[in-house]
Image: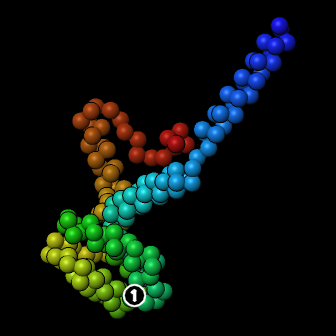
Amino acid sequence: MKMTMITTLVLFCVLTIGCQKESMEISPDERLMNSKLINTYSDIAIQNAIISEHTMFPYHFVKNGAELNELGQRDLAVLTGHFAKNGGHLNIRQLGASADLYEDRVSLVREMLQEAGIEMERISVSDGMAGGSGMSSARVLVILKQASRIAGTKTSTSYSPEMK
């Protein structure tokens, strides 16, 4: 009797585990769907970063040329989609490019935006920093000092290892 009970229990466990294994397998369709979902989330994050940065760098262009490379075309397409619905600012960084090359790059990007139907009156283009105009560290220190005076606290304006 005891041996029959043990055998039945072991057989039941083996069958239960076997059934669970089959149900845990993911079908190829589910894998494809999961993969596409992950890629979609990644694409959305990349598009949001491109819009937030709103900047074309020299690496977006063919080396020593005014034409956009594949990365530049992708980023400009994302920005074009954004600018079609919203006004805004586009930075095109000159960095090491000559004045003539920089002007050619700006002209090309403006032309491409216009061809895509973007109203250029709604967009400003300059050689600004990525993500906006930013703020100098000197201005940040002034603001911190003013805030500490108002709060009646002392604010440190120097770096120390404890501030990590």
Q: Quadrant of residue 161?
A: top right
Residue drawn at point x = 66 percent, y = 37 percent: 21
- Going by the picture, which residue comes out furthest to the top? 1
Asked whether the viewer can see residue 119, the reply is: yes
Q: Quadrant of residue 52?
A: bottom left
Q: What is the basis of the colouring in this image?
A: rainbow
Quick one: 141 or 7, which is closer to the camera? 7
Q: Quadrant of residue 78?
A: bottom left
* Image quadrant in which the N terminus is located: top right
User: Where residue 134 sits: x, y (%)?
Assistant: 32, 60
Q: How many marks?
A: 1
Where disc 1 sits, the SS reads: loop
User: Where residue 150 sits: x, y (%)?
Assistant: 24, 36
Q: Amino acid at mark 1?
A: Glu
- Going by the picture, which residue comes out furthest to the bottom? 100
Quick one: 4 or 117, which is closer to the camera? 4
Asked whether the viewer can see residue 99, the reply is: no
User: Seen in the image, is 126 located left or right of residue 15?
Assistant: left
Residue drawn at point x = 26 percent, y = 66 percent: 82
Residue drawn at point x = 30 percent, y = 43 percent: 145
User: Where residue 45 sits: x, y (%)?
Assistant: 41, 56
User: Seen in the image, is 84 located left or right of residue 24?
Assistant: left
Quick one: 87 or 147, which is closer to the camera? 87
- Going by the picture, which residue comes out furthest to the left? 121
Does 145 appear above or below 132? above
Q: Which residue is mark 1?
A: 67
